[in-house]
Amino acid sequence: MAVFLWTMIPCMANRRQRLFVAGGPVAAFAALLAYCAKANWPIGEMLPVYCSLYVAVSLGMVGHRKALRAYMLDRAKDPTRPEDGTATPWILQMAFTLPVFLGASLWYVTGT
């Protein structure tokens, strides 16, 4: 999570954005705990999936921190601006890293 926070927090334009990003790992962990409780799955076996999600997002942002910062500054100036994730330069990199890392971690967890 340290790599994720190191990557994302400096790119946020204001405190509200930084708190939202910092709350992401906590919210995702709470969702993971709820899923494991409902599915009766040991939490230790799902931690690779949780960790791979944040490693993938961090790697998906490599080389795009300035662009993310500019995008978040624009969003802070005009909060009514619609979110158009397809117009951001890092979407292709994210579209590659997320499935690769999550697929590998799910393959590892399920053992198939």
Image (cartoon, rainbow, N blue to C red):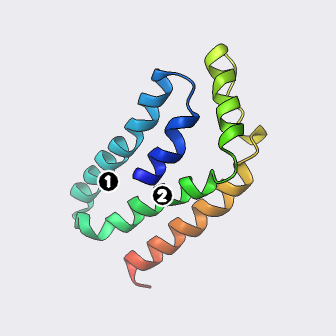
Task: Judge the density around disc 1: few (<14), some (14-19), many (≥20) Cα neighbours within 10 Å.
Answer: some
According to the picture, the residue beneath numbered tag 2 turns out to be 53
According to the picture, the residue beneath numbered tag 1 turns out to be 32
- Whether residue 11 is visible here, answered yes or no, is yes
Residue at far bottom of view: 112
Residue 98 found in image quarter: bottom right
Mark 2 or mark 1, earlier in chain: 1
Figure disc tally: 2
- Whether residue 79 is visible here, answered yes or no, is no
> Helix, strand or loop at disc 2?
helix
Task: Judge the density around disc 2: few (<14), some (14-19), many (≥20) Cα neighbours within 10 Å.
Answer: many
Tell me: 106 left or right of 82: left
Residue 110 circle label: none
Tell me: 51 left or right of 63: left
> For this rendering, which residue is in front, 102 or 35?
102
Q: Residue at x 58, y 35 (%)?
A: 11
Which amino acid does the dot numbered 1 rest on? Leu
**Residue 33's x, y, as percent?**
26, 52
- CA separation, marks 2 and 1? 12 Å
Q: Residue at x 21, y 64 (%)?
A: 40
> Helix, strand or loop at disc 1?
helix
Residue 73 found in image quarter: top right
Which amino acid does the dot numbered 2 rest on? Leu
Mark 2 vs mark 1, foreground winner is: 2
Q: Residue at x 66, y 37 (%)?
A: 68
> For this rendering, which residue is in front, 37 or 32?
32
